Amino acid sequence: MIRTNEFTLAVIAALGFAALAVATDFNLLTAGTLDAFLRFLALPIVIGLAQMVVLAVGQMNLSVGVLTGFCAVASGWLMIDAGLPAPVAVLAALALGAVVGLVNGLLVIFTRINGFIVTLATMTILEGLRYGVNGTGTYQGYSPGLREFGQASLAGVPVVFLLAVAIAVGVALFFRRTVPGRHLLASGGNPFAARLSGISNDRALVLAHTLSGLLAGFAAVIVVAAFGSVNASIGDDLLLPSFAAPIIGGVALAGGMISVTGTVLAAFLVRLVDVSQSQFDINRRWVDLIIGAVVLGAVLLGQFRDKLSGGPR
């Protein structure tokens, strides 16, 4: 059964895309423009999923954007300065993201400090480390094969976009078909009932943060492959989109309810806003204001629905 929120988002996304196509004299539908649209849609999709998995247990990850940039810069450093092959750099980016996520989860468990504070501290530390790797310099000219992968298409569809879709499918299957995925949702929805059922809430928190870090690592790989160059500023503008996609997509802030489809559709809408901003030279501050207002509206609407239904779902 199609959820009302997801169906509404699909309609809005279709209408918004059609309106933007008309406003740009159908330039949006040309092969090159459409390719670029989908290629750079991959990043907000994966970033949104990285935030969604921690929201599933009622946590937040403020470090997700900076972690993406840190993993991307580290990957560039491994290829350029350390001279390691691209596959090693890619695996290192994924491992680094997962390890940082694991540390976030363990800190939440052992300190009993909310993930909001823990990841805020992690974000600050990573910002310093990110600039410490190569300062304000740019890594470019690394593995031609990796850059070709970032620009490759399959049947006219960018491979990095297909990778993001595959990751989204994997996340959806994890929550729907695996025991750990269902435990995460149970722990986020009602920690007390989950504990009585034998579910470890601590293990769920650690797993959620680790998965979030791993997904940030995947986002870093997409950045390195699709952008062709990386520097220490990568990730600075990803925090708001990371929250916008899942929250607009219908994910509950209190935990226990996720929507992969809604997150992907909301990421599509965020990408539409970005394209509109560049096409019509809209001040970026206005764009952030609009997205922030929509996120706030989605939160308030979710709270209103919870009150009508007698409590959080």
Image (spheres, rainbow, N blue to C red):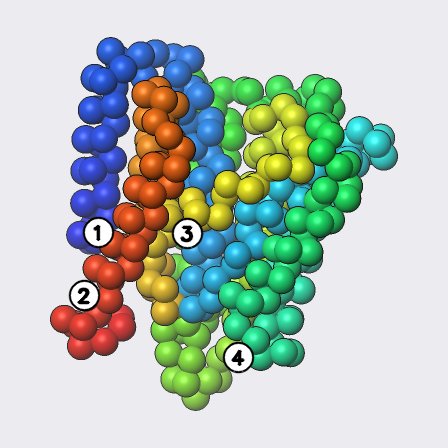
Please name the residue shown 33% across and 63% down the image. Answer: 252
Residue type highlighted by circle 1: Asn
Say which amino acid is labelled 2.
Arg
* Alpha carbons under labels 2 and 4: distance apart: 29 Å
Q: Nearer the viewer, mark 3 or mark 1?
A: 3
Check residue 34 in the rendering and tell me which mark sits there, or answer none. none
Q: Is residue 148 above or below residue 94?
A: above
Q: Between label 1 and label 2, give the one nearer the viewer.
A: 2
**Disc number for residue 305:** 2
Q: Can residue 39 be seen from the camera position used here? A: yes
Q: What residue is disc 3 on?
A: 243
Would you name the residue on which mark 1 appears? 5
Mark 3 or mark 4: name the one nearer the start of the chain.
4
Residue 37 relative to residue 207: left or right = left
* Percent x, y of residue 290: 30, 42
Q: Secondary structure at mark 1?
A: helix
> What is the residue that sits farthest to the left in this orientation?
308
Does dot 2 land on a helix, a strand or a loop?
helix
Q: Nearer the viewer, mark 2 or mark 4?
A: 2
